[in-house]
Image (cartoon, helix red, strand yellow):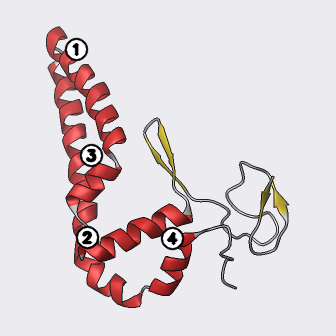
Amino acid sequence: MTLCAHCGKKNAPEAFHCADCGKVLRTEMYFGLFVGRYSDQLLAQHLLQTRTRGRPSYRAFLLRNWKSYLFLVGTYGLALVLFGIARFWIPFAFLAGYIIAIFYRDFQHISVHRKVWPFNAKVTDWNRVEELAKDTTSVKNPD
């Protein structure tokens, strides 16, 4: 059972939101077949690291997501090789374009974060972020 930090009610372990008050119980992000469970604490630590660096960086993004990119390149790369060997050029071209589009999308996502970072840094409650980065079990949801 998962306890809601806001209302104290018990929820099913797989629940994302509290059944009574609707508050978020956990945050998860999915990358292909790899499931990365990101707690509020880990996300707050990433935010503090970004503040220390000055703004989001492409390198940090790639280092945080290297497993998903390795899986992507490995599986789709193998499929590209097989399509090339079999001379299936239309699926080869489609898959190559798809891979390029995935990387383009991700780098555009980071580019947008880099552009809006000065505003985000001004409006973020850094004391709250530091609390979350230290220990999520002792931090209650606001409201």
| Badge 3 amino acid | Ile
Dot 1 or dot 2: first in sequence order is 1
| Badge 4 amino acid | Ala
Question: Residue shown at 15%/16% (left/top)?
Answer: 84
Dot 4 or dot 1: first in sequence order is 1
Dot 2 or dot 4: first in sequence order is 2
Left or right position of 7 against 84: right
* Mark 2 crowd level (few <14, some 14–19, many ≥20, 10 Å Cα): few
Give the numbered dot on residue 133. 4
Left or right position of 143 against 54: right
User: Residues under labels 4 and 1: Cα distance?
Assistant: 45 Å
Question: Residue shown at 29%/56% (left/top)?
Answer: 61
Q: What residue did someone put label 1 on?
A: 82
* Mark 3 crowd level (few <14, some 14–19, many ≥20, 10 Å Cα): few
Q: What residue did someone put label 2 on?
A: 112
User: Residues under labels 2 and 4: Cα distance?
Assistant: 24 Å
